[in-house]
Image (tube, rainbow, N blue to C red):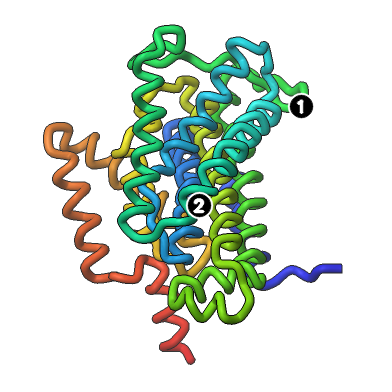
Amino acid sequence: MMRLQKTEMLLIVAALLLGLSSLISPDWLVFTSTLAIAAALVVMGVVMLMRAGLISFGQGLFYSMGGYAVGLGGRFLGVTDALALIGMGIIATVALAMVLGLLLTRYREIFFAMLTLAFSMILYGILVKSQGLGSTDGFGVVKWSILGYQPGQGLESTTTLWLAVVLALAAALFLNRYFQSSIGLACEAIRENEVRVEYMGISRRQVLYINYVIAAALGSVGGSLTALTAGHVDPTMAYWTISGEFVFIALLGGTGHVAAPFIAAFIFILVRTYAVELFPNSWQLILGIVLLLIILFLPKGIWSLFIRKRGAEA
């Protein structure tokens, strides 16, 4: 029987506290928290690639595919179960990632980054030109349920948050073990020296391929949750600025722990929300300054604060 690690126990406690907080939190905070969790799931995929020395500016491709799977599944296939819609998005995304991964895992550094960006923008162009999918305006998501349970009036936000918490917890627990596995450790070795990894008899392309496909699946789940939360999908989900935000959040949190993307995503979403509210005409400037200061003083991400604290106590 597999024993829970200390990190996993803390993740479970944090997830329960976050879920229970939705019972006393205002709707806007529940809504914002759900979007933050959805973004963090995508960022976890970005972090996976960063640990292997790759930077993806195209996670918006999988993020939008997850969102549009929710919208299209309900609109054209009549599927209303949230888990089924999320599953459809994962299947479609993984299928595409398995094909693209054969090409992209051949490249490194700027070439990998630009190719991922290019594929994301191709999807954006297709969605913008698709009149049947609402073109630039997108379209609404149908009313959904979970295993036959239909959230009542006013309970949609809380239900979506609990769904996001459960999926995020499952992803975090999986990645915590994955990073400690032979493949996860090989990713860091590839980042440091690919040639030596090959000499050890490990296929670097196979490791990167697995990493890329899992990252795509996480991006799809994040997009699906965003669609379920917002009740709408549009082509901007695939636009390069959205992918840039995910990379920014990944740098903000750091790659040292599975909890880092969640902490960084919450900070990013909250700072952006208050910046828009207080400075509607210059919120981008405020957001940029605040986040720039964090990166300047914490170059290894927010998680480095916890590492420093632990080192000081030792």
Q: Residue at x 51, y 28 (%)?
A: 67
Most distant residue in the right direction: 1
Residue 225 in the image: x percent, y percent?
54, 34
Q: Is residue 81 above or below residue 55?
A: above
Disc 2: CA contacts within 10 A as few (<14), some (14-19) or many (>=20): many
Quadrant in which residue 312 is drawn = bottom left
Asked whether 295 or 180 is in front, the reply is 180
Find disc 1 in the rendering and name its residue: 147
Q: Secondary structure at mark 2?
A: helix
Which quadrant, please, contains the N terminus? bottom right
Report, in whole angstroms, how far the alpha carbon at label 2 lies from the one at label 1.
27 Å
Quadrant in which residue 182 is drawn = bottom right
- The amino acid type, in three-letter code, at marker 1 is Leu
Q: Is residue 108 above or below residue 18?
A: below
Asked whether 125 or 62 is in front, the reply is 125
For residue 46, side relative to residue 295 (left or right): right
Q: Residue at x 50, y 41 (%)?
A: 38
For residue 286, side relative to residue 5 (left or right): left
Find disc 2 in the rendering and name its residue: 45
Q: Secondary structure at mark 1?
A: loop
Residue 208 in the image: x percent, y percent?
54, 60
Disc 1: CA contacts within 10 A as few (<14), some (14-19) or many (>=20): few
